[in-house]
Image (cartoon, rainbow, N blue to C red):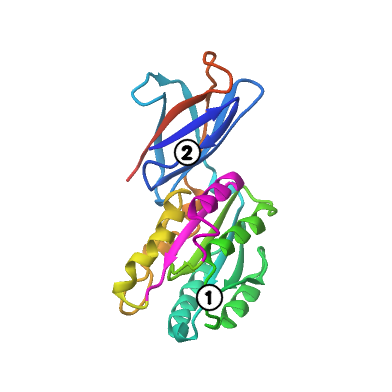
């Protein structure tokens, strides 16, 4: 379930009430509200309902499923390379990346970057599979400080200029951010929503006791409607359903269109609840 607040004819997504639904909405000059919605599970949406405010009457809405086979998607994958002692973990990430790259289709544009205290794009979005795999092979654990949230903002900026129907920032990290004061997580989420970017969180722990560090990745994913997954210890492999559905996560959902309200004070907030029922 997702609440969306509309202000003066435009739509501003509020925080998702469930981890598996995200949206990007706008109002048009014809008095319609148009919402692109997606879910963080690889499942088809069967029915969507729209209500004005919690418990309000259901509003008539048209839902069109997202035609993933006909649409384009862009993914920028960020790999946390901080701490030379994590080379074995980076090697496991490289294995997962090669599997993901193998699964890319003709309408999938993928880019690869690494980071510690700065972002380094080593394969631009849209690179061939050969170039992507060469970039993966060059990944090496190095650096000390981890500026996770600032780097995430730079990744969102890089995606903003890419032409694609949907876009995702994929972060492979242990979640140990050292820039939370200067770059609060709420700021990153807001920037991602404004740019229509979904964030995937992919956690790689060194030990189970470090699990609380992954909450930053979990929140980035949850609050933008993206999936979160953590590599399974002790062998640090990702669940098979994540890699096999990697591209499908961005191809879920669809478009909702419904009438904007004809009553209410101009400039006031009008709350709506959008509920999606899936096939699973």
> Residue drawn 47% across and 33% down?
4
Q: Are marks 1 and 2 in contact (CB under 8 Å)?
A: no
Label 2 CA crowd tier, 10 Å (few <14, some 14–19, many 20+)? some
Q: Position of residue 263 (x, y in %)?
A: 52, 13
Residue 136 located left or right of residue 202: right
Judge by depth and name the residue closer to the eye, 65 or 82. 82
The answer to which quarter of the image holds residue 125 is bottom right
Estimate the spatial distance between the alpha carbons at disc 1 and disc 2, rounded to whole Å.
32 Å
Instruction: Choose the circle earlier in sequence order: 1 or 2.
Output: 2
Q: Position of residue 200 (x, y in %)?
A: 47, 58
Task: Locate the N terminus by quadrant.
Answer: top left
Is residue 241 placed above or below 28 in the rendered structure? Answer: below
Tally the marks: 2
Q: Position of residue 180 (x, y in %)?
A: 49, 61
Residue 14, numbered label: 2
The answer to which quarter of the image holds residue 88 is bottom left
Is residue 191 placed above or below 238 in the rendered structure? Answer: above
Judge by depth and name the residue closer to the eye, 280 or 234. 234
Q: Residue furthest top?
A: 263
Residue 145, numbered label: 1
| Residue 232 visible within the image | no
> Residue drawn 64% across and 51% down?
164
At numbered mark 1, what does the secondary structure look like: helix, strand or loop? loop
> Residue drawn 45% across and 48% down?
223
| Residue 256 visible within the image | yes
Q: Which residues are magenta?
A: 179-205
């Amino acid at each position: 379930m997702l609440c969306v607040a509309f202000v003066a004819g435009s739509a501003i997504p509020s925080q998702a009430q469930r981890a598996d639904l995200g949206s990007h909405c706008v109002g048009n000059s014809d008095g319609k509200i148009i919402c692109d919605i997606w879910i963080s599970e690889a499942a088809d949406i069967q029915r969507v309902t729209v209500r004005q405010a919690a418990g309000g009457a259901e509003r008539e809405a048209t839902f069109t499923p997202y035609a993933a086979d006909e649409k384009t998607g862009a993914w920028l994958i960020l790999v946390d390379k901080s701490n030379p002692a994590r080379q074995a973990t980076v090697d496991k990430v490289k294995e997962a990346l090669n599997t993901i790259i193998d699964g890319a289709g003709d309408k999938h544009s993928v880019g690869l970057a690494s980071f510690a205290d700065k972002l380094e794009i080593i394969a631009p979005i849209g690179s061939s599979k050969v170039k992507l795999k060469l970039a993966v092979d060059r990944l090496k654990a190095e650096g000390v400080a981890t500026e996770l949230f600032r780097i995430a903002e730079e990744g969102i900026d890089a995606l903003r200029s890419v032409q694609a129907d949907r876009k995702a920032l994929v972060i492979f990290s242990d979640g140990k951010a050292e820039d939370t004061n200067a770059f609060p997580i709420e700021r990153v989420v807001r920037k991602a929503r404004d740019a229509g970017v979904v964030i995937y969180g992919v956690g790689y722990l060194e030990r189970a006791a470090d699990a609380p560090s992954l909450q930053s990745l979990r929140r980035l994913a949850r609050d933008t409607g993206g999936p979160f997954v953590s590599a399974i210890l002790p062998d640090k492999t990702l669940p098979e359903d994540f890699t096999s559905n990697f591209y499908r996560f961005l191809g879920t959902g669809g478009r909702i269109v419904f009438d904007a309200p004809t009553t209410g004070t101009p400039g006031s907030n009008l709350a709506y609840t959008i509920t999606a029922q899936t096939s699973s």
